[in-house]
Amino acid sequence: DTGVSQDPRHKITKRGQNVTFRCDPISEHNRLYWYRQTLGQGPEFLTYFQNEAQLEKSRLLSDRFSAERPKGSFSTLEIQRTEQGDSAMYLCASKNVVEYTDTQYFGPGTRLTVL
Amino acid sequence: AQKVTQAQTEISVVEKEDVTLDCVYETRDTTYYLFWYKQPPSGELVFLIRRNSFDEQNEISGRYSWNFQKSTSSFNFTITASQVVDSAVYFCALSEALESPALGNTPLVFGKGTRLSVIA
């Protein structure tokens, strides 16, 4: 069990550019979440997958955001035409849904800075 | 609607002091789960504890203890004999059970966090 990993750890981009982040969950975890955390705030839910199916999207997830989990393993989060307001830490978490006794484990996050 | 309130934005204590971090939650569900996570300067959220709504027993783990009181909708976290390594932002979070066990729980709703500074 190597934990949740995210890549890259840091990304600096110019406004208007597209960026893509990757998350590798703990192996065999069937559920994967994306959260966004801005400075001084707690993480806020963006979207989650059960295997390869995207089950829920937050209203925070504008049309410029898209997430995929093509084979039910790793996931990508893409932001198109980035804006300065997209600057945040993007956190990925995974868990195994076994009845209700499940806990989300988080990766180290990708810190995005939009100039 | 779910809501988690951590009224203490920042706390500063001297090493070896005890400190309690407050968490108050709101939910209309009868089955829910409460969590505490630690976020050190490195940024990764570290899971500390999960508590089920039907289990009000307090828990102690080393220098950490948790006081869950449904009557006041609170889930407070106490660190005894604090150490410099305890310096971090601590988040309380809430998740509700969905209609069937196979669906699991709702995504986590976090409080804004409490920044704890332990001074040597």
Image (tube, coloured by chain):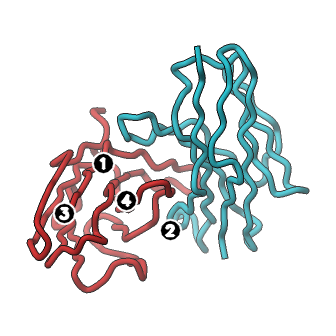
Circle 3 — which element? Answer: strand
Residues marked 4 and 2 touching at CB (< 8 Å): no
Query: Which residue is found at the position 55% from the left and 63% from the top?
Result: B105
Please tell me which residue lies in front, A45 or A10: A10
Residue A31 circle label = 4
Instruction: Report if the CB atoms under discs 1 and 2 are less than 8 Å apart.
Output: no
> Residue at horizontal 34%, vertical 78%?
A61
Chain letter tied to cyan: B
**Is A12 rendered above or below residue B66?**
below
The crowd level at tag 4 (other Cα within 10 Å; few <14, some 14-19, many 20+) is many
Q: Which subunit holds the residue at mark 3? A: A
Is B91 placed above or below B46 here? below
Dots 1 and 2 on the same chain: no
Observer-side mark, 4 or 2, equals 4
The color chain A is rendered in: red
Alpha carbon separation for disc pair 4 and 3? 14 Å
Return the residue at label 3.
A76
Q: Which mark is residue B103?
A: 2
Q: Badge 1: few (under 14), some or many (20 or more) residues near its Cα, within 10 Å? A: many
- Residue carrying label 1: A109
